[in-house]
Amino acid sequence: MRISSFTAGGKALYGAITEAGAVALSTEFPQWPTLYDAIAAGGFGRLVEAGRGRAVTHTDFTFDMVMPDARRILCVGVNFPDRNAEYKDGSAQPEHMSLFPRFASGFTGHDQPLIRPPENHTLDYEGEVAIVIGTAGRRIAAKDAYDHIAALTLCNEGTIRDWVRHAKFNVTQGKNWDRSGAMGPWLVPFTDPAQLDDARLQTRVNGELRQDDHLRNMMFPIREEIAYISTFMTLQPGDIIVTGTPTGAGARFDPPRYLVPGDVVEVSVVGIGTLHNTVADEAP
């Protein structure tokens, strides 16, 4: 079962996505105006059940960022050993993970263009798996962490590279340009540890494989991410954690291979799907 946010006939909806089209469910759950509201209220399981075996309601629709009104999105940076080595600073694996916030306005949906701003053309890609919290928790033990996940999705954590260097201690301004990244196409219910433990993440640009790694190679596995983050903040249903990208982003080529209008970027994990985006310049 795949649940997503989409627009049809000028109206924002959410529901199940099938091979034949979309099944709008939002009209059946008026108490939950958005997919985020449903997850925050603990209703994701009800949506999954409601979508089973239903006839398609829309064949003409566009995907939105999977949770357009997500309140809290935390990203884990430099979380694969080869990524750490890419920095060529001789540093060993850090003791603690690097974190930074992203906001929903920085993401677009599946099949939509990533937007390159006129101020700077160092738009880069980062394919990642994102998890959506379904059960609240504080100081969650790593062994219990998976019990707090409701769903999985994919993220292209698009970055304006030059702008992550504007300050000494943060990368936030390079990570939050409007519609510079993408998240989706949908949420897949998390039901089996193997969905993460055996996951192989791949990113292609114009069909060329650029990133290819297994989540088991992360320096800070997802169980540890949940445990660490929940130490300092109570994780709430609807929170999103973007878990880290492998080596192979465009900035690390010599010369760098940044995205340009017309490029096609695909982030894939078997069992979750493929997030597909083009690239376009911001309209004047």
Image (cartoon, grey):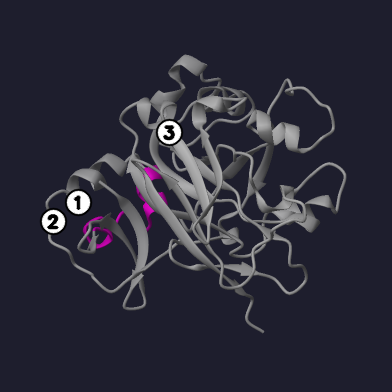
Which residue is labeled 3 in the image?
199
Q: Is residue 247 magenta?
A: no
The picture places residue 42, in percent across and down from the top left corner, at 34, 39
Give above or below for 201 relative to 180: above
Point out which mark residue 54 bears.
2
Residue 240: percent from the left, percent from the top? 51, 42
Q: As rendered, which of 250 and 7 lies closer to the eye?
A: 250
The secondary element bearing badge 2 is classed as loop
Measured Cα–Cα span from mark 3 to mark 1: 25 Å
Residue type (three-letter) at the residue carrying disc 1:
Gly
**Residue 66 seen by the camera:** no
Magenta residues, as a range?
25-41
Residue 88 to residue 257: above or below: above
Q: Nearest the camera: 15 or 61?
A: 61
Q: Which mark is residue 51?
A: 1
Q: Of helix, strand and loop, which one carries label 3?
A: loop
Q: Nearer the viewer, mark 3 or mark 2?
A: 3
Alpha-carbon neighbours of circle 3 within 10 Å: few (<14), some, or many (≥20)? some
Q: Please state which amino acid type lies under the numbered disc 3.
A: Ala
The image quadrant of residue 78 is top right
**In the rendered structure, are the residues bearing label 2 and label 1 in contact, judged by CB atoms less than 8 Å apart?**
yes
Residue at coordinates 62% horizontally, 55% vertically from top-left? 158
Check whether the beta carbons of the residues at disc 3 and disc 1 lie within 8 A of each other: no
Residue 37 in magenta stretch: yes
Q: Residues within 10 Å of mark 2 (few under 14, many from 20)?
A: few
Q: Position of residue 23 (x, y in %)?
A: 22, 61
Q: Amino acid at mark 2?
A: Arg
Tell which tag, 3 or 1, sits nearer the viewer. 3
Residue 133 in the image, given as x and y percentages of width and height = 45, 36
Tell me the CA gap for discs 2 and 1.
6 Å
